[in-house]
């Protein structure tokens, strides 16, 4: 069973950038669709971005479109989320998720079988 661990979250000033990382262990993540979700207090978990196992296709939720870039390195069993032009409303816990067939409906949390513990991103105004 693949396990995921996120890192890179911290306090950042509005307009700044952050790069989140997700490392998979306990097996290869290369055949999994990988995604990033986020959850702010009192809100539902929201799809941010996802990437197919071949890295041939990326998908973005509305919140990150044009500002965030998702990527992966299958040799290192890692996925990344580059976040630019951060806004205070981007403040949330960011989760890495993996699912073999999640590309069918990437925004559906039920499609993912493995989740990381989350990393806190706080954007100050």
Image (cartoon, helix red, strand yellow):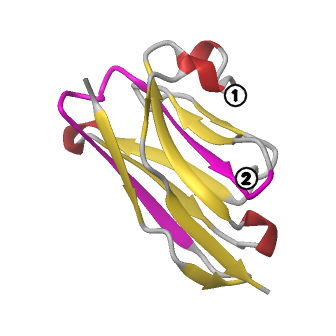
Q: Which residues are magenta?
A: 18-42
Going 72% across and 73% down the picture, which residue do you hit? 85
As drawn, is 109 to the left or to the right of 20? right
The C terminus lies in which quarter of the figure?
bottom right
Q: Quadrant of residue 108?
A: top right
The answer to which quarter of the image holds residue 44 is top right
Tell me the residue that label 2 is attached to. 64
Q: Residue 41 in magenta?
A: yes
The residue closer to the viewer here, 35 or 73, is 35
Which residue shows up at 46% across the image and 46% down it?
A: 71
User: In the rendering, which numbered label is found on residue 107?
Assistant: 1
- Left or right side of 76 for 115: right
Judged from the image, the secondary structure of the residue bearing numbered disc 2 is loop
Which image quarter holds the N terminus? top left
Q: From the top left corner, tell me how far across and down residue 96 is, in percent.
A: 48, 43
Q: Residue drawn 51% across and 76% down?
A: 10
Horizontal side of 3 relative to 17 (left or right) equals: left
Quarter-wise, where is residue 29 in the image?
top left
Q: Position of residue 110 (x, y in %)?
A: 60, 19
Please state the horizontal and vertical placement of residue 53, each as a whole percent of the image.
Answer: 40, 25
Give the Cα distance between marks 1 and 2: 13 Å
Q: Is residue 95 above or below residue 14?
A: above
Q: Secondary structure at mark 1?
A: loop
Q: Is residue 119 above or below residue 61?
A: below
- Asked if the magenta segment contains residue 71, the reply would be no
Magenta region's main secondary structure?
A: strand
């Amino acid at each position: 069973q693949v396990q995921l661990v996120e890192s890179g979250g911290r306090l950042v000033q509005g307009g700044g950038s952050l790069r989140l990382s997700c490392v998979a262990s306990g097996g290869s993540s290369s055949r999994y669709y990988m995604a990033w979700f986020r959850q702010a207090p009192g809100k539902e978990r929201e799809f941010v971005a996802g990437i197919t196992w071949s890295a041939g296709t990326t998908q973005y939720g509305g919140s990150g479109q044009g500002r965030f870039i998702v990527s992966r390195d299958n040799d290192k069993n890692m996925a990344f989320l580059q976040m630019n032009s951060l806004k205070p409303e981007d403040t949330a816990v960011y989760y890495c998720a993996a699912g073999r067939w999640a590309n069918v409906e990437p925004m559906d949390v039920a499609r993912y079988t493995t989740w990381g513990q989350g990393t806190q991103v706080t954007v100050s105004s």
